[in-house]
Image (spheres, grey):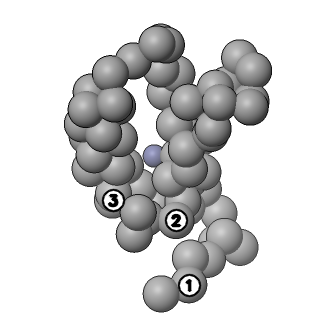
């Protein structure tokens, strides 16, 4: 994923398993499991698109190209 401020938690994170998180606006999208892999891919794409233009909450957070 190009947007490195969008992270995806793996299955080891307990309650946060498979959750997607935007480190810029702090939004967390939990994913109900079990989920079809195709659905998950689509959700991740949609999530990344939604948060693609998010701005950092403060100027100290810089994303390197
Ligand atoms: Zn965001």
Where residue 41 sits: x, y (%)?
Answer: 30, 39
How far apart in space, not on screen, are marks 1 and 3 (Cα)? Answer: 15 Å
Tag 2, which secondary structure? loop
Residue 64: mark in rendering: 1
Asked if residue 21 is positioned above or below residue 17 in the image, the reply reads below
What label sits on residue 53 in the rendered view?
3
Q: Is residue 50 visible?
A: no
Residue located at (51% from left, 37% from top): 20
Q: CA distance from mark 2 to mark 3?
A: 12 Å
Residue drawn 52% across and 65% down? 4
Whether label 3 lies within 8 Å of ligand 1 gets the answer no
Residue plotted at (25% across, 32% down): 38
Q: Earlier in the sequence, mark 1 or mark 3?
A: 3
Evaluate whether residue 59 shows in this view: yes
Q: Position of residue 46 (x, y in %)?
A: 25, 40
For residue 3, above or below residue 39 = below
Q: Distance between the Cα atoms at labels 2 and 1?
A: 9 Å
Q: Position of residue 17 (x, y in %)?
A: 64, 26
Label drawn at residue 27: none
Q: Earlier in the sequence, mark 2 or mark 3?
A: 2
Residue 15 position (above or below residue 24): above
Q: Nearer the viewer, residue 29 or 25?
A: 29
Q: Is residue 11 left or right of residue 30?
A: right
Q: Which image quadrant: the N terminus? A: bottom left
Instruction: Give the mark toward the camera: 2 or 3.
Output: 2
Q: Which residue is mark 2?
A: 4
Where residue 63 sits: x, y (%)?
A: 56, 76
Element at label 3: loop
């Amino acid at each position: 994923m190009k947007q490195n401020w969008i992270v995806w938690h793996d299955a080891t994170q307990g309650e946060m398993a498979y959750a997607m998180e935007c480190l810029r606006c702090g939004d967390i999208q939990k994913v109900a499991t079990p989920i079809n892999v195709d659905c998950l891919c689509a959700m991740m794409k949609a999530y990344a698109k939604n948060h693609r233009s998010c701005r950092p909450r403060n100027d100290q957070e810089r994303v390197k190209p």
